[in-house]
Image (cartoon, helix red, strand yellow):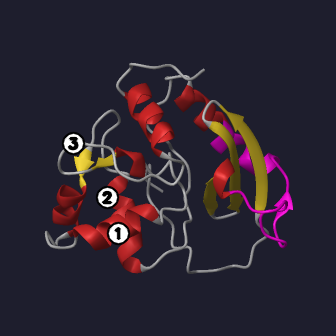
Amino acid sequence: MRKGELRDAHEFSFAMISYAMLDSPIGELTLAADDRGLHRILFAKQKCPTPPDPVWRQDSAPLEEPIRQLLAYFAGELKAFALPLAPLGTPFQRKVWQLLCEIPYGETISYGELARRVGNPNASRAVGLANGSNPIPIVIPCHRVIGSNGKLTGYGGGLPIKEKLLSLERRQLRLL
């Protein structure tokens, strides 16, 4: 599997989903994965009652590598994640998420540019919806998409977190 490549999560194996909490510099994160790869990263404000889903089991062992890579990212030591990813989404969402993985560390693009890369320059709103439904923020770097005027726009973790992540990538901030 290539770095950042999304696995087809629709080939559902009904594998057990494990989850773990990570106390990160941007708040508590809940990570969820199965044997196919990382499925979710939830910010504390998105957090569901524990366990996040009744069929998930708390087990950090399968999430050791995602946790290690996230901590290295927050310390400014990792620019590209190399994890198997298995987000659930429509084919269009998955195409958008794959393109998000291609935005280089420290760079930003507009929703309009992302729509052009998808192949439909008029699809800015649809791209924005797909971007906003990204189940694996940070690793699938939806924080690197900004408004056409250069301003920060919505982010699932909140705009202050988006600003911190972009500052980290511009080497203006170290989170660890």
Residue 114 in view here: yes
Q: Residue at x 73, y 40 (%)?
A: 22
> Above or below — where is 60 with respect to 129?
above
| Label disc, if present, on residue 106 of the rendered structure | none
**Picture coordinates of residue 148, whole percent (x, y):** 18, 51
Q: Residue at x 48, y 57 (%)?
A: 1
Q: Residue at x 50, y 23 (%)?
A: 77
Q: Which residues are magenta?
A: 47-67
Judging depth in this view, the residue of 141 and 111 nearest the camera is 111
Asked if the magenta segment contains residue 96, the reply would be no
Q: Which residue is mark 1?
A: 95
| Label disc, if present, on residue 150 of the rendered structure | 3
User: Badge 2: how crowded within 10 Å, few (<14), some, or many (20+)?
Assistant: some
| Label disc, if present, on residue 99 of the rendered structure | 2
**Picture coordinates of residue 44, whole percent (x, y):** 68, 49
Residue type at tag 2 = Leu
Q: Quadrant of residue 28?
A: top right
Asked if disc 2 and disc 1 are in contact, CB closer than 8 Å, the reply is yes
Q: Secondary structure at mark 1?
A: helix
**How far apart are the alpha carbons under marks 3 and 2?**
19 Å
> Above or below — where is 69 with respect to 13?
above
Asked if disc 3 and disc 2 are in contact, CB closer than 8 Å, the reply is no
**How far apart are the alpha carbons under marks 2 and 1?**
6 Å
Judging depth in this view, the residue of 158 and 170 nearest the camera is 158
